[in-house]
Image: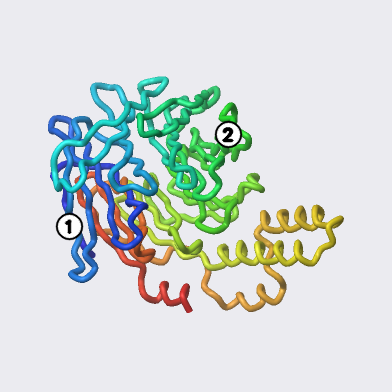
């Protein structure tokens, strides 16, 4: 395991999505009495070393960072100071290894309780800020940032976080109180769907599957991870435990639907392997595609509806596939990394290497973990 220690306490760790060659992450600190820092960490694969490549000053403590999907020099920070929180768009000076960030625009909220910022991958000119009681959509241009639309979260709904779909530019999911809300960014007026009581306690994290377009992963204060199909929100596809305290982040692997990692206040990072669940999604997609190709036009609608219903129930695999999978691995936790000595708030897979994972504990310690070889080979072979 490779470890890097920041100078101050920290809660924010995100991967740089634009670099698919080198594993890089951004770390934002949360010092109350010191000037904070944004650090660019890079993993040197040849020497197996995690090192800081760039450091920039940031006055206020940071609670979230949203990097531009295609540019390394642009990112939004969600910060807090003197009881207020807001968001700012920054530009890192080109070539500089340290110094001050260049402010590009303010992204103020409706209230003083900003939770996080989300930068759209399929629509890089769009940023969404999530506040305790509001959502706001921004258009990012060379001139700065312009608010496009805003809406309240709803009565008695306290938003904690959110996630934008990696391919569908109009789909947003938010974690509000114990529920999950789905929104259409084209209108952003009220939720178009909801998972009621997604968890028994507040939901802290949402992650979209890398390939199964309608599947999400949620985690919360009840110490559980739950897998959902948005087409059938009545019950989870799967529930997994393994933590002893609140789960702050749970993320799908960026490439493999069967791998998920999570971090918690119990100072642990868990890795889950769900080959059965991932296979059901793949089989459902294949069955639906085959049915659509073989079905006459007049019957296509009925076949699509049946395929969606089967996929939602997680029962789309044909009989032969089900029989072959009886001796396969069961879905569940496969590894617990307990090298941290404080609550683990940050978690991010490498964009360049899908077998590499970074985690951040409140004491500023960043640790790298690798997917065990036996799990890696099961996926590849």
Say which of 316 and 144 sits in front.
Answer: 144
Q: Which of the two discs, 2 and 1, sits closer to the camera?
A: 2
In contact (CB < 8 Å): disc 2 and disc 1:
no
* In the displayed structure image, the side of residue 22 where residue 170 appears, left or right: right
Q: Position of residue 42 (x, y in %)?
A: 23, 57
The image position of residue 225, as x and y in percent, is 48, 51
Q: Residue sitting at 21 percent across and 45 percent down? A: 94
Q: Position of residue 113 (x, y in %)?
A: 37, 25
Q: Would you place residue 223 above or below residue 316 in this image?
A: above
- In the image, 290 versus 280, the foreground residue is 290
On the image, which quarter does residue 261 sit in? Answer: bottom left
Residue on which disc 2 sits: 186
Q: Residues within 10 Å of mark 1 (few under 14, many from 20)?
A: some
Residue drawn 35% across the image and 29% down it: 143
Q: Is residue 104 visible?
A: yes
Q: Which residue is mark 1?
A: 51
Compared across the picture, whether 306 is left or right of 17 comes to right
**Left or right of 201, for residue 6:** left
Give above or below for 307 relative to 107: below
Q: Which type of secondary structure does the marked residue at label 1 adopt?
A: strand
Distance, label 2 to label 1, CA atoms, is 41 Å
**Secondary element at image label 2:** loop
């Amino acid at each position: 395991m490779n470890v890097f220690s920041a100078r101050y306490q920290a809660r924010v760790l995100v991967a740089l999505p634009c670099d698919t060659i080198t594993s890089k992450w951004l770390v934002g600190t949360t010092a109350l009495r010191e000037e904070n820092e944004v650090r660019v960490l890079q993993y040197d694969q040849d020497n197996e070393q995690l090192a800081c490549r760039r450091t920039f000053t940031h006055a206020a403590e940071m609670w979230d960072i949203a990097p531009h999907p295609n540019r390394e020099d642009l990112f939004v920070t969600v910060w807090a100071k003197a009881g207020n929180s807001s968001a700012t768009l920054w530009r890192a000076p080109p070539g500089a290894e340290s110094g001050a960030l260049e402010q590009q625009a303010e992204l103020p909220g409706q209230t003083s309780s900003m939770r996080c910022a989300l930068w759209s991958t399929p629509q890089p000119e769009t940023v969404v800020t999530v506040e305790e009681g509001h959502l706001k959509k921004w258009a990012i241009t060379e001139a700065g940032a312009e608010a496009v639309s805003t809406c309240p979260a709803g009565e008695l709904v306290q938003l904690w976080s959110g996630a934008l779909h990696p391919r569908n530019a109009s789909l947003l999911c938010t974690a509000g109180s114990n529920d999950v809300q789905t929104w259409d960014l084209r209108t952003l007026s009220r939720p178009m769907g909801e998972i009621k009581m997604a968890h028994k306690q507040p939901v802290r994290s949402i992650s979209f599957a890398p390939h199964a377009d309608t599947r999400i992963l949620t985690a919360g204060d009840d110490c559980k991870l739950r897998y959902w199909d948005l087409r059938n929100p009545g019950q989870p596809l799967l529930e997994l435990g393994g933590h002893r305290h609140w789960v702050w982040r749970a993320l799908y692997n960026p490439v493999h639907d069967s791998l998920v990692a999570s971090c918690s206040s119990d100072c642990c990072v868990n890795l889950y392997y769900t080959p059965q669940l991932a296979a059901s999604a793949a089989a459902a997609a294949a069955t639906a595609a085959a049915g659509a190709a073989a079905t006459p036009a007049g019957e296509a609608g009925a076949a699509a509806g049946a395929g969606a219903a089967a996929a939602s129930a997680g029962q789309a695999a044909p009989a032969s596939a089900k029989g072959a999978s009886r001796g396969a691995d069961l879905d569940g936790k496969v590894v617990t990394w307990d090298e941290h000595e404080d609550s683990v708030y940050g978690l991010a897979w490498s964009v360049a290497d899908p077998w590499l994972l970074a985690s951040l504990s409140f004491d500023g310690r960043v640790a790298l973990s690798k997917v065990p070889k036996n799990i890696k080979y099961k996926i590849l072979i």
